[in-house]
Amino acid sequence: MSQRLLSIDAQIVSFGDDFVIKVKNSETGELKEFVTVRDYAEYLVQSVNSSRCDNFVANWLPSPKAKREHIDLIGMQLGMMQEWMDKELGE
């Protein structure tokens, strides 16, 4: 019996001083765009919680249209969110 895997693929696209995080959900085929890391993270949690798949993976795709400063900012914000979640879960 094979397990089904939910894949959430994300890519950063910069335009001027702003960016969007483009996301594709492998289970639903849904395409979304988010302008904050928090909105992306909330979508990720919602997708996992509503999925019928056995497991999930969040992938960052190559982002050739992203500015280095946006990649660094998003990485820093994701790291801060992970630290907060670890404290909340007592890890």
Image (cartoon, helix red, strand yellow):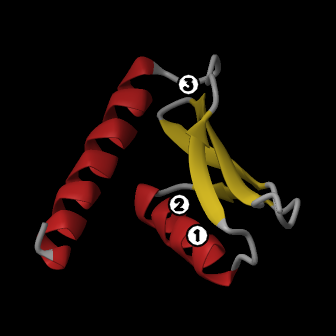
Q: Residue 49: which quarter of the image? A: bottom right
Quadrant position of the C terminus in the picture:
bottom left
The amino acid at mark 1 is Tyr
Specify few, some or many for label 2: CA neighbours under 10 Å numbering under 14, 14-19, or 20 or more: many
Image depth: mark 3 or mark 1 in front = 1
* Circles 1 and 2: CB atoms closer than 8 Å: yes
Residue 28 pos. (x, y %): 86, 67
Q: Which mark is residue 66?
A: 3
How far apart are the two marked residues, 3 and 1, measured between alpha carbons? 21 Å
Position of 44 with respect to 74 (left or right) is right
Specify few, some or many for label 3: CA neighbours under 10 Å numbering under 14, 14-19, or 20 or more: some
How far apart are the two marked residues, 1 and 2, measured between alpha carbons? 5 Å
Q: Residue at x 47, y 34 (%)?
A: 17
Q: Secondary structure at mark 3?
A: loop
Q: Earlier in the sequence, mark 3 or mark 1?
A: 1
- The residue to which callout 2 is attached is 40
- The residue to which callout 1 is attached is 43
Q: Residue 56: which quarter of the image? A: bottom right
Position of 30 with respect to 73 (left or right) is right
